[in-house]
Amino acid sequence: MALQAARALNADLGNLPGEASVDLVIAAYALAEVPLAKARETAVALWKACENTLLVIEPGTPQGFSRIHDVRVALLAEGAHLIAPCTHVNACPIQPPDWCHFSVRLARRREHMHAKKATVPFEDEKFSYLIASRQPGVLEGARVLSPPAESKAEIKFKLCAETGLTQQSIARRGKAEYKRVRKLEWGDLF
């Protein structure tokens, strides 16, 4: 298995190694800990510390997306290849007050529920992310940017593609296409 020999390294974001030394760097909710003005600089240092892939995850807030957007611009300038969620290398079409984020439902343990005084055994964690690689990936299609809205007549999707942001609607009467897209979720490729 590829991860059998994996090891975790902890590093100070202000003092990263200058040359590539690991295959994969994951910076999860880390850029929020550095001043906004240093987010790009830190992302470039993280990029230089990896030999292959960089994954940056930030809170799914306008501020978290702003950091991800800055990282995207900086990494493209460094020659990085985007893997996800972007399906193109054009300028990001998302403008404030909108922001690109996704959601995942996480189970809560009893201790977590007690600490948060929660009444449900799950929470929906919203996040923004970017995956960049030194190897080119296949950039095609469009990313579903919000939960699909289903009505009696159609399903509507907000999509981000090479041509920009669009609204796609698939009518129920187009049975084959409707059946195919009905299973799509927020964050999927269209």
Image (cartoon, grey):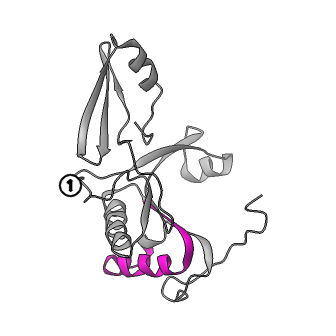
Q: Name the residue: 28% across, 49% down.
A: 162
Q: Position of residue 168 (x, y in %)?
A: 28, 31
Q: Image check: 13 left or right of 99?
A: right
Viewer-closest of 1 and 43? 1
Residue 180 higher or lower than 77, as above or below: above
Q: Position of residue 39 (x, y in %)?
A: 37, 76
Q: Position of residue 46 (x, y in %)?
A: 49, 77
Q: How many numbered marks are there? A: 1
Q: Name the residue: 43% across, 40% down.
A: 189
Q: Image check: 114 left or right of 73?
A: right
Q: Name the residue: 48% across, 76% down.
A: 47
Label 1: few (<14), some (14–19) or many (≥20) C-alpha neighbours in 10 Å: few
Q: Image check: 17 left or right of 89?
A: right
Q: Position of residue 93 (x, y in %)?
A: 23, 53
Would you name the residue on which mark 1 appears?
95
Instruction: State the SS at label 1.
Output: loop
Outermost residue, top side: 173
Residue 70 higher or lower than 16, as above or below: above
- Which corner quadrant holds the N terminus? bottom right
The residue type indicated by label 1 comes to: Gln
* Quadrant position of residue 184: top left
Report the magenta residues as a range.
Answer: 33-58
Viewer-closest of 144 and 107? 144
* Quadrant position of residue 151: top left
Magenta-colored stretch includes residue 37: yes
Magenta-colored stretch includes residue 43: yes
Q: Image check: 25 left or right of 67?
A: right
Residue 182 higher or lower than 101, as above or below: above
